[in-house]
Amino acid sequence: MILLITRRRFFGQSFGITTGAVLARSLGLKTGSFGIRAAGRTGSTPMIITSHPNPTGQAALEEVWDTLAAGGSALDAVERATNIIELDPEDMSVGYGGLPNEDGVVQLDASIMDGRTYNAGAVAGIENIKHPSSVARLVMERTDHVMLAADGAKEFALSFGFPEEDLMTEKSRRAWLRWREEHSDRDDWGPPDHLRGWEDEQGRGIPEAAGDREAFLRGPELSTHGTVNVLAVDARGDIAGITSTSGMSWKVPGRIGDSPIIGAGLYVDNEVGAAGATGRGEDVIKACSSFYIVSRMREGRSPQEACEDALRQIDARYAAVGIDFRPGEKFVAINRDGDYGCAWNIGEGPPAMSVMDTAEGYRRHEGVNTTG
């Protein structure tokens, strides 16, 4: 006999402690088991962290801290904090002012996951909406879907009253125009062919456009720009997370990275912890990195150890096929006990993150660079 259960009936009658316990047993999981706690705790709860160690990251955590510390939900805290970062015009890889695709169009991705309800939502390739993280939350809470993309995501946002806005700042527009002129010497963008490298008798070349000498046009710095992860655990022990980005600069229009993909750019397990990823999304997708990090924590690894494990896993995959390639990734993670960690395999020096908890308040924490 086939039993037909409507969505409303399922949530009304079947979503309870008994169902959760049966499901856990069927998957071979130990209910209430978080693995072996690693030695040397690094934090306490409530706690909220962001991959952004810059002043905007600090301001975002400080803005939501009083409410979180007073018993507010982790879900509300990560959304409010992410919204602040999405509005930062100086951050050229998140929200407003994010660098566009090769056509000069800013396309945003975001995901959200609520450990308390095991629910998730995401938007991909959404245009002209400043807060993709908040739209992702509506997808999670107001639909039976996990992800909406492109025009469908935009129309969904507009139906809930989000204003349609130009996401390019003057700074990001000039960066794109400069890239368009300089990324190839085989197209028609840039100076006329007969004037390329030309100088007059006084040694003067073609005048540069206003602002072209600004340092940011030579490439954003890794330490201040990138996808943002915000993860939190509240006073009740519930965990939530968000990942938000404008994606890879100058990407092929329509490209979707890891950020809106649950298990890749973000994963939350209320019994264990949460993880988020920034960096080259293609490799994070293939490795399911955030899910892998949380799985490692379930096995007893600390957040710091699990982040490092995920980087080494990616390195090992390329080594297995004989390719000497190390993509640039940064991972951050927390667990239910208030421990945290971050790691990357980018250049020199350690990665950093912003942390705020009941033990020490705000601090900038440095993690581990696995390149040695």
Image (tube, rainbow, N blue to C red):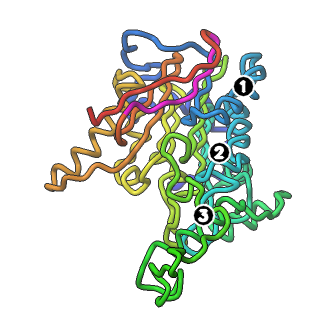
Circle on res. 10? 2
Q: Main secondary structure of the magenta part?
A: strand
**Mark sitting earlier along the chain (3/1):** 1
Q: Secondary structure at mark 3?
A: loop
Classify mark 1: helix, strand or loop: helix
What residue appears at the point 76 percent right and 28 percent down from the top-left corner?
63
Vertically, is 265 above or below 36? below
Between disc 2 and disc 1, the foreground one is: 1
Q: Which residues are magenta?
A: 349-358
Q: CA–CA distance between discs 2 and 3? A: 59 Å
Q: Residue at x 75, y 18 (%)?
A: 71
**Residue 286 location, x and y as percent?**
35, 54
Residue 344: quadrant of the picture: top left
Q: Closer to us: mark 2 or mark 3? A: 3
At x 72%, y 22%, the residue is 65
Q: Nearer the viewer, residue 214 or 180?
A: 214
Residue nearer the viewer, 108 or 289: 108
Snapshot quadrant of residue 39: top left
Query: From what the image shows, is residue 66 above or below residue 247?
Result: above
Q: Position of residue 316 (x, y in %)?
A: 21, 44
**In the rendered image, which residue does mark 1 sit on?**
62
What amino acid type is highlighted by mark number 2? Phe
Residue 354 forms part of the magenta stretch? yes
* Residue 128 visible here: yes
Q: In the image, what residue type sits under mark 1?
A: Glu
Q: Residue at x 66, y 66 (%)?
A: 173
Kindly identify which numbered label has been placed on residue 212.
3
Mark 1 nearby-residue class (10 Å; few <14, some 14–19, many ≥20): some
Point out the frontmost of discs 3 and 1: 3
Sequence-first disc among 2 and 3: 2
Task: Find the distance from the CA under tag 3 to the CA under tag 1.
Answer: 35 Å
